[in-house]
Image (cartoon, rainbow, N blue to C red):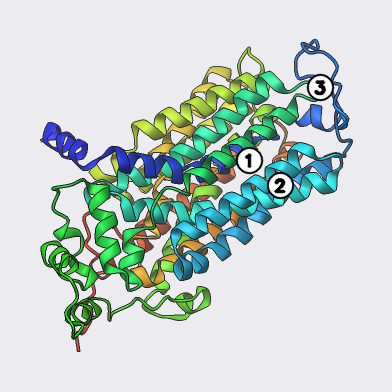
Amino acid sequence: MASTGLRQCVRDVTPYLLLLILVSTLGPLQFGFHLAELNSPQDVITCKKKSIWRYDMGRSSTSKLPQCIPMTAAEFAAISSVFTIGGLLGALCAGPVSDAYGRLLAMRINAFFFVLGAILETLSGNILILGVGRLLAGVGAGASTVIVPLYVSEIAPPAERGLFGSLTQVMINVGILVTQTLGYYLSRGSMWRIILAVGFGIGVVQAFGLMIIPESPAWLAAHKHPQKAIHVLQRIRGAGRSINHEIEGWDIPTVAEEERLLSEPPTPTGRRDSIVSKTSQKSVANIGFFQVFRDPLYQPAIIAVVGIMFAQQLCGINSIMMYSVSLLSGVLPIPSSLLTIMISIINLLTTIACAPLADKIGRKSCLLLSISGMGTMSFALAMAMRFEIKILSAISVILFVAFFATGLGPVPFMMASELVGQEAVGATQSWSLGSNYVATFLVAQFFPIINQKLNETFGGKGLVFFVFAGLALLSAIFVAWRVPETKGKKDADEVWGRTRRVD
């Protein structure tokens, strides 16, 4: 059975499909890159150190740009968090833009924000310019995490949408790993600017790549372009592969009939045009950002996606990803910056290894497995840090990150497009990612404060992870209660167990 499924997956995946996914997922890669780009070189950028190494490995820079930008801890926190503000703006705007003008145009606009933001960051000589660059990169990042999962789900073979949907989280982790590795070697002197310049290079590559890839066939079909939609989908699936089962809900003729109509010259009466026009009479009316929440038909989906996005962050993953250098100092006898790279590698490898889980055991099962595992590891980490059991601390951190990859990492990004119909996907993704950025900001802003307050009040370390364990329990209850299974369901109506009256 397993070998049959593998052979089917290989047949469904064409080189052209892989190219489209590679180009589109450069957006999430840049999200991860910019999210972590200031982590390792923080002390160098803020003029506290000339190098994160014990000795300066490089030569003095001859650049006219300042070697560092003096700033207080509060100013650096503002520079870091402005990225999430940009992400929130991008996430809220991306859905309506991609619904109205297409996924492809939205991704091209996105690439512009990444390129411009990286230029300003690389050439910044003061806090203001660096902050504006981070804000613009954040807009691109937020928009990418809305648009790219939509695009990937709409070009991926139906049986492998869970697998390909997890690539959003995989590429985010690749971006984090790339920037953490660069930071380990380039956090000295003015070399930190090279880290930021690499972000510019990735943005340029994506911008050129987006010039050669097509619009989503599902979006084309929903916006009165059925012939072009069929042509694009057939090219993605490969010549000779039947796509009839994928276009059943498009309100258009079968592939054979469509190709026959297109191959025939128009009659003097314009018969071909009239026939084709019948295939495109039905167009999806897009549901707006606020309308989708007010409509009782979509409210359960909005509640579900907002809840799982809050769960993703409130279970505590970014307490490790964003603060591991200081938080885990002394846990292992290696530099904390190197430990951060190791954590990023574990996160990436487990995300890749667990990618097929969503299609095998289901989205909801993955979420519950992930949340329960992270909650257990949060409790173990709190106990280990309080009683200074280093080996248990290390094991707990590794398993904490691994459990995140089994469900809470990839699944929330793919579920928004599976809980609603095509007409509401963009708005739902905006709600989803908007809530994600709000939750990310809450953790980024208040985790250090709560952690310090609890440690000072009760003594010891790691008490905040008891809080994360409690939040994981609440998250598990919410998922079990309000989140439906979407695996193997044909559409949103089947997901929610409802039938629509046909007039």
Name the residue tied to disc 3.
189
The residue at 66%/55% (across/down) is 86
Quadrant assignment for the N terminus: top left
Residue 134 is tagged as: 2
Q: Where's residue 416, x and y in %?
A: 40, 60
**Residue 442 can be seen in this image:** no
Mark 1 secondary-structure assignment: helix
**Residue located farthest toward the front when viewing the structure as drawn:** 268
Label 1: few (<14), some or many (≥20) within 10 Å? many
Q: Do the residues labelled 2 and 1 touch (CB within 8 Å)?
A: yes
Mark 2 secondary-structure assignment: helix
The residue at 21%/42% (across/down) is 12
Left or right: 122, with 146 as reference point: right
Mark 3 secondary-structure assignment: loop
Name the residue tied to disc 1.
34
Q: Where's residue 113, x and y in %?
A: 63, 52
